[in-house]
Image: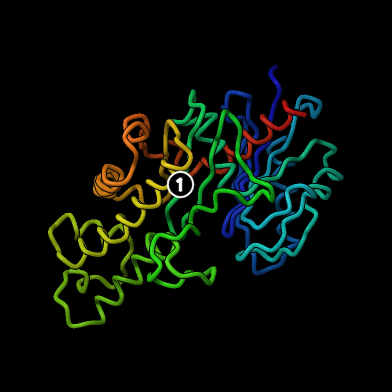
Amino acid sequence: MDNLYVGVDLGGTKIYTALCYGNGKFINEIILKTEAEKGAEQIVQKIKDSIKYVIKDIDKSKIKAIGLGSPGPLDIKNGLIAEPANLPFVNFPIVDELFSEFNIKIYLDNDANVATLAEYMFGVGKGTNNMVYVTVSTGVGGGAILNGKIYRGSTSNALEVGHTTVSVYGRRCGCGNIGCVEAMSSGTAMMKAAKDAISSRVETSLKNYNNITAKELFLEANKGDKVSMEIVETAMSYLGVAISNYANILDPDLIIIGGGITDSGDLMFEIIHKEMKKRCLGPILRNCKISKSSLGSKIGVLGAIALAMIESKNK
């Protein structure tokens, strides 16, 4: 039997754990609620329980490594979950904790990097040498493969794409800065703009909804609602500016866009392409392709597995 790998996708609402072959084929999987409000100790126990579940009846000697993807900030060098916004950890030594339980090599990385690895190993990025992954949902994040390797930077905090500036006079971001792409282009940003419109005297079909998400915004924009189109065009144009910057700086073969907002149809990609045509250098524009993520809800756990595979081979 081939080497086996365990991946753990730790999120604010769920813990998704799977046991896989090296080709990404699942053997066992389980999803548990994180229940972050109950504290760090029970989260760690759930991670352990989920790993025990997926490796039950398996010869442990065949398990090569365990990968863990977690929201940051992290201290990857020391195996710590530092202080993520939606999880009750403060410099928690998760790698040591799991290694002492299972005596299997443990590898930790942030959720954006593992998603990037997932696309590179198992998704539409397979076969590329230089690629960028950008996820757009409630926030904006990303990662990059450069010359066939994940790029982490000196402090392992590279490719914080959501906090690159696209407007010096834009909205204030949750990070404290003004005009970050996350503040201008995320689903959260578009919902704020929609609420502002609804509470004003402007005529818009958005007032027919009790709850507005990016899905409703794109739906009404495609139907011709001027306010919805204005919000969508503004947000996606800023995203297009950001993606053009990433293309010009990194010169990738492929930029993959993931996250819930990609389910909204072709309009966002049309606007992004329009901005790239205006802003990217010719050779870069002709080479760089834009693609929708292909891995859906499994991207995090597949990324954790990809992390385990790559790092265990490098050690």
11 or 160: nearer the viewer: 160
Residue 172, given in percent of the width and then of the height, sits at 45, 72
Residue located 28% across and 61% down the image: 234
Q: Residues within 10 Å of mark 1 (few under 14, many from 20)?
A: many
State the scheme by which the image is colored: rainbow
Q: Quadrant of residue 63?
A: top right
Task: Check the picture and name the quadrant holding the N terminus.
Answer: top right
Residue located 20% across and 72% down the image: 208
Residue 53, given in percent of the width and then of the height, sits at 70, 41
**Furthest residue toward top:** 1
Residue 263, given in percent of the width and then of the height, sits at 33, 48
* Vertical position of residue 113 compared to residue 89: above or below: above
Residue located 61% across and 55% down the image: 71
Task: Check the picture and name the quadrant holding the C terminus.
Answer: top right
Q: Which residue in the structure is indicated by mark 1?
A: 134
Residue 133, given in percent of the width and then of the height, sits at 47, 42
* Vertical position of residue 111 compared to residue 34: above or below: above
The secondary element bearing badge 1 is classed as strand
Disc 1 residue type (three-letter): Val
234 horizontally vs 1: left or right: left
* Vertical position of residue 184 compared to residue 14: above or below: below
223 horizontally vs 29: left or right: left
25 or 30: nearer the viewer: 25
Residue located 60% across and 57% down the image: 33
304 horizontally vs 217: left or right: right
